[in-house]
Image (tube, rainbow, N blue to C red):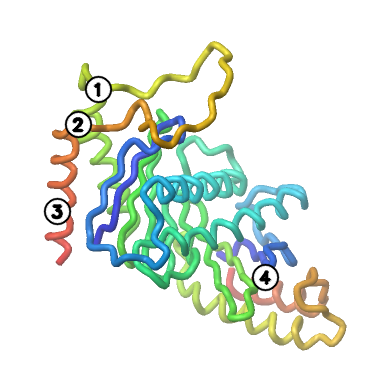
Amino acid sequence: MFLGLWIINKAGGLIFQRDFGESLARLSTNDYLVLAGTFHSVHAIASRISPVPGSSGIETLETDTFTLTCHQTPTGIKFLVVTSPGHANIAGLVRQVYDLYADYVMKNPFYTPEMPVRCEQFDANLLKLVKAVN
Amino acid sequence: MIYSLHIFDRHCDCIYHGDYAQATAVAGALDASEQNKLVYGVIYSARNLVNKLRREPASDAPFLAFSTSHYKLHYYETPTSLKLVMITGTGVDTQAVRDVLRAIYRDIYVEHVAKNPLAATTPGPSLVRTKKKPVDNSVPPHALITNVAFRSALDQLVAGLMAGSD
């Protein structure tokens, strides 16, 4: 079950947030911004406390009701994909979300990188993906 | 592959820290107290993040573990706010380590520390409002575990686990 998607830009600001399904708590916009900032910092510190050199930041975060997978692109954008714990093929799902982002957000000439994502096509195709997965 | 184990009490002090596998020296290596503070910061933030996102208020600490490309950090919190953190290699099953942490708490901590009449225990929440003193890094925390039996039992358990996994 694909539960939610967050996109965080290079500076740690939340540029996209959508919940699918009812499993995650409904918070105010401000709360989401704060959580995204917190995650951005934790991601950075996680690579610092590593016992072996060259570690990346957090890639997966497991809890009892959901699993959060973070995919960081070489440009510093983080895609946080929230799924239910038993979800198979999370890597494939992340790949599909990234493909949608590349097609409908980055190729949109009116979209400024690192700014909040307001692209209808992206939303529509994301919903289609969610329906196909769930 | 188990790299290290930290135990934090309810006052955010690191009361035990054990290093196991040969962790190759990280360039710009942090000294022990800095490392402890960073680890605590990471688990505190991760825990709050997860608690905020859960729909029902969490009765049991929901944050279980997080993994990166090179290591996996496992977290177990007891109802008395004692936090056990174990850093292992990647690909280690979360539930298995959770059981190990629970066993460490139940069989080693409770046996050698909680049941020890001479052990310095973590002070409970203060009912009297006292002025907060600045953190003094040179003074070890009051509840630091110096119990030899605890340390040796833990070393034995970890050695057993590492040997079993090879």
Residue type (three-letter) at the residue carrying disc 3: Ala
Cα–Cα span, label 2 and label 4? 46 Å
Q: B157 or B14, which lies in front?
A: B14
Residue depicted at x 61% and y 70%: A79
For disc 2, the marked residue is: B147
Residue type (three-letter) at the residue carrying disc 2: Asn
For disc 4, the marked residue is: A10
Residue type (three-letter) at the residue carrying disc 4: Lys
Q: Residue furthest right?
A: A110
Q: Earlier in the sequence, mark 1 or mark 3?
A: 1
For disc 3, the marked residue is: B159
Residue type (three-letter) at the residue carrying disc 1: Ala
Cα–Cα span, label 3 and label 4? 42 Å
Of discs 3 and 2, which sits in the foreground? 2
Q: Quadrant of residue B104?
A: top left
Cα–Cα span, label 1 and label 4? 48 Å
Residue A18, image x, y percentages: 71, 63
- The chain that hosts pointer 1 is B
Q: Residues within 10 Å of mark 2 (few under 14, many from 20)?
A: few
Residue depicted at x 15% and y 67%: B166
Of discs 2 and 4, which sits in the foreground? 2
Cα–Cα span, label 3 and label 2? 18 Å
Numbered mark located on residue A127 in the image: none
Q: Earlier in the sequence, mark 1 or mark 2?
A: 1
- Does residue B119 appear left or right of residue B55 in this picture? left
Q: Earlier in the sequence, mark 3 or mark 2?
A: 2
Numbered mark located on residue B119 in the image: 1
Q: Quadrant of residue A118?
A: bottom right
Tell me the quadrant of the picture where the N terminus of chain B can be found.
bottom left
Of discs 1 and 3, which sits in the foreground? 1
Cα–Cα span, label 1 and label 2? 8 Å
- The chain that hosts pointer 2 is B
